[in-house]
Amino acid sequence: MLNLYKETAIEVKSTTSPSRTDIQIPRANGSYDRSKFSKKPERHDRLAVDEKSYAAEYLAASSSVFIRRESSYPGSFAWRVVSQQRVLEISNVDFARNDKDREADRTLAFEFQDQISPRGVSICDSSTGSEFHIFVLTQENEVFELRLQIKFFQDAKSIPPDTSSWCTPIRASSLSIDRAFQLHVDNPHDLFVSFASGKVQHWKRDGTDSQWTHINYDDKTWGAALFSIVSRKVHADIDFEGMRLAHNTTHAMIRSGQYLFTACLNHTLRVWHLDSGRLVDSRDLLDQARDPHDNVQLNPAEPGYIQFLEGTNKQERILLTCSPLNGGQIKLWRVKNAFADEAELFSIEDMAPNSVLSLPDPDPSGSSVWSLTGLRLIFDKHTKDWQAWVLWRNHNYHKVYTLNFSFTDISSQWSKEWVSVSAVSTKSPGPDFVPTDAHDVSSKWLDYLLFPRRYSSAAIETALAQYSTALDTRLSASDRRKSLRERLALLIGSQVKLRSYDESTMDYDRYAVDTDQQWRQFWRILENLNEGRYAPLALALDASSGMVMITMADLCCVVRECNNLELLDTNEVADIELMPQIVRSRWPYRRLLFNIQEAVPAVVVLSAAQKFFSSFPPDLAVNFGQTLDEDLYTKSDLPTSDRIVNFFDEIDFANAVPDDVEKELNKNLSEIGGAEAISNDIYALLLKLIVEHKVTRTKPHHTKTEFGLDLTFAALLKEIVATRQALLSLLAVVIFLDGNEQFNTCRFFDELVLRLRTQERNLWLATHYRSKKSTSGDNKAAPMSILQDIYAQICRPQSTDHHPMPFVLTQHIMDNLEFVSGESDLPPGEAGVYFQCNLLKHGEVELASDFLKFQPPTAFSTYIKGRLNLALGNYKEASLYFQEAADSLARGKALVTLFEEAKAFNEAADVARRTLDALESEDGEPLPNFRQSVLLRLFNSELKCARFEQACDALVRFSDLVLQRTSATDLVNTMLDSASSLSDSLGVVKQIQDLPLSTHPNLANHVDHHLASLAKKQTSIPSAGGLWLSNTPTDYLSILHALRLFKKDYRGAVSVLFDRLRLIQKSGRARSDPKATSLRHALLAIINTMTCVKEDEAYIVTDSAENPRLASHAKGLKRLHEPDSDDQDPRRKRTRVVVTLDDFRREYQRVLDRCSRIERGDFEYGHESEDESDEEPEKSYQGSKLVIDRSKKDETLRLTNGDAMQLS
């Protein structure tokens, strides 16, 4: 049978999802088994310990999808009964939503106090559209109505804590008399209850707050009751879930107009008039005449099927019934006047009395038993035909079939045009043990078991508990808090011991074998648990969008169309010939990328290649993979032909392939004429189908929901794995059959390797995770694959207005694969670089290091490698990568910034210098002021490295004079900063002297003015002059004096000494020193320095108020008058006097005389006080002594511990 569809299985919601809201529902009398405020763990927090408890806790007993009549979001909700049939979980499963809609991402879990009946959940929509109603029947015969508003799924805070406001029990006297079997709700005002006695009761109300009234539908008149007593010997009751069901118990029911249609366990169709409760029609489900004594019964454990086909008019509707007899048959009925009040106008007739509409047989051999689990007919608005979908079940396996038909040619189409759906695989082979494998055994098993979406975390945890119980092994409390991967490695590893042959030789080979055996035992336990997750439970179809879903015990499967490659991969040659006709009628909106003449040989080659590759012995498969990795990730200069030969020889292909595998390959290729018939056209077509896809360029206003994201990337992961497997298979055949002269081996080897490198990269992105903040608002981090995080909303899904959802899904998945592979908008090979940038942006340095193997040999990739090494702190390696990339990328300024942000100023300066060197060889600047900007960064970097001469070299090259002066100030401040300088005061003076400022007078003057301004602000003379302490004020006066002496600016040096003299006169230490040591030294330094000045220039100008003693000595000189800007009275004038060398000498002599009088004890009380400063004494200190050595041609400066600056 032709296969046109595929399935994608995902978990709807995890039981430990952060977006889950648990709510307890009390019994009808208001009681709870467990207090709402109990501290006991919730049911979903309790770990299962074996297969039975796992199935009871995590696998659904019943499940389905409710699709609302309103087309607005949210429109589809998946529900399931879990946790020992006491918890009803419901969550939204819409694929997309409008941008303006708020995400309905919460899972509501209602915990009932009693078990929910197998057919005890029925859901209907409300007329307002803002809520829907769920009716629940428990094993204690209690019925509850839950009125759920849409906002409950958007915000948990909107759920009223008082459940009575939205959850009410329905009380009916019949519930205390008879056992309810099934519920069916048509609308919030009409509820139908099927009882075990065979009775059906209609519960009706006028409004949602009104009382229910009851109408019974039961044909047991006095005569019927007598007949039932007699016929009980023939029609015995049926035992089901602790109930005894009458043979005429309603198995399925549906309402249309004024009538209720029921399918009963005794294989009959009954029609009841709603208002009168009268039975208006009763006949066999297949409209066959049967003997009353025939014991034909339906299985109450299987669902019943009765459906009105949407799209038909009210006067004449079509009813579908189904019987599992004879391999499954359906019957279509024409119902007339179903909305007429008069029962006499009602009629029902067989539409095809002479046709047998049998369902497709999943096992024509009859070796297995299959049960019908789902059947739906919908009208396809895109093809204007009817679609039938059938779901068969055999334990945990299932098969889905579908048919497009019209009522005018139903017999012919029904027998010929069924197509199948490729079911999701329930098992995957574990990794083979190969002693020569370079990978660790435990690492291989951990990667396999934790591969995304292969096993659920609950299944692994249960298998871990079951394994530890069987071996009586327990983890410590601290180990139990570790990650699942760590706990698996610890527990499995603890069961294996490293043994030795003798006292010196350890048996590592045996250790590897034992380790593999332990992992394999654990895997078998996990496989047994995992099989139960795939048990199919229901089939759901959305007629408006065409979405087809299969709910399972722990999964939800969504059906989509096969892409072009899958059409060839999943079909046999005999079926390919039927494809064009069926595809044209079923998919009029789609065009195949191949014709039948091309497809047949391509199918043969692809199938043969995949069988050939899958038949490799384990050691050959491992060697093939290792050799391929070397070729993929190692740059080789060898020609392609030599690479193929090396590949062939490395794995010893000629001897490693078993004879039976080679014979099977030749046999499979014989359908097209053998290996010699493999042509370039065949491989070109296969590669075209693998990589060619036209990305949808429209801009829809839809955003994927959380369910849509999960579904997209689950399908994308499967697509990446399948594409990779196909490429590996084709590559194996290319290498093995190298030598065909009609086939361009080198060309396709290169193309296959290129595509494989891309898919390996995609697989890496899909299987490595990062934590993302949950969108549910509870601030919990949820793991998300890097691939999903990057491409979550880049590709938006299309609307289903013009195409059905199975096509939209496939198109959307291929769009994502195209974007992920970088074949759309990015330059060839550059997609991997952008992924690397994303990793670095998120600070995932370890992942980025592992991702290096996927980087192309481009300049931009080399630049990003530099960024990675920069993040790792490998500054030298980063600089080398940046230097290599700089030849092709103008990134100099940007690189300096990167190194500055990393505080790698040495590398920043190095890059800046190379950038300036490159600018010298170019005409002009790439950007305005680019050179100035690089110079500034070079200056700052050298400054940070305390390389002041190099910083000054950059400074003098500045073209911006304002910026130059500002930077010169920064240079001086940094050199004088005791916290960052490594030199003492003498060293700082020497460093400033060594700066090449002599050839730049403007800069030298600016530095002098800046030091002078700092000296003017100095308020004391620091002690410990030779030491450079961070808590000691800088002696700017000494430094400025030394620099001016170095420049032979003696008058400037005198002015500095004079400022120093004033500070000494104000100090408390000078006033308390009877020998006036510091004062005498200061005066002597001034006198000595002024002797170096020309006689006519040996003077200074000072304010008489600041130094009255010197002013008195200079009273015979010319007085200068200037306004006193600091005085509040503008009329006052301040007097400035000229002080000469003689004045200083007289002052020096006065000080000596005073000291002599003090030594003799000749005091004149009250005479000297008026000449002294009245200021408060300051902190005592010891100054510095500057000695000028004139014995050499160049004057040198020497700072010594003393109180004054002296010339020697």
Image (tube, rainbow, N blue to C red):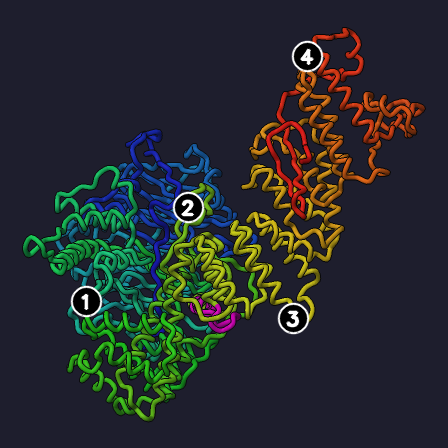
Q: Are marks 2 and 1 in contact (CB under 8 Å)?
A: no
Location of mark 2 (residue): 781
- The residue positioned 23% from the left and 49% from the top of the image is 488
Depth check, mark 3 against mark 4: the one in front is 4
Q: In the rendered structure, which disc, 2 or 1, sits on the residue that comes first in sequence?
A: 1
Distance between the alpha carbons at the discs numbered 2 and 1: 40 Å
Graded by Cα atoms within 10 Å as few (under 14), some (14 to 19) or many (20 or more), the crowding at tag 4 reads few
Q: Looking at this rendering, what residue extends furthest in the right direction? A: 1131
Distance between the alpha carbons at the discs numbered 3 and 4: 78 Å
Give whichever of 914, 1148 is nearer the camera. 1148
At numbered mark 4, what does the secondary structure look like: helix, strand or loop? helix
Q: In the rendered structure, which disc, 4 or 1, sits on the residue that comes first in sequence?
A: 1
Instruction: Indicate whether residue 936 is drawn in magenta.
Output: no
Location of mark 4 (residue): 1159
Distance between the alpha carbons at the discs numbered 3 and 2: 52 Å
Which labelled disc corresponds to residue 894?
none
Amino acid tagged 4? Glu
Q: In the rendered structure, which disc, 3 or 2, sits on the residue that comes first in sequence?
A: 2
Give residue 67's quadrant in the image: bottom left
Location of mark 3 (residue): 922
Depth check, mark 2 against mark 4: the one in front is 4
**How many dots with numbers?**
4
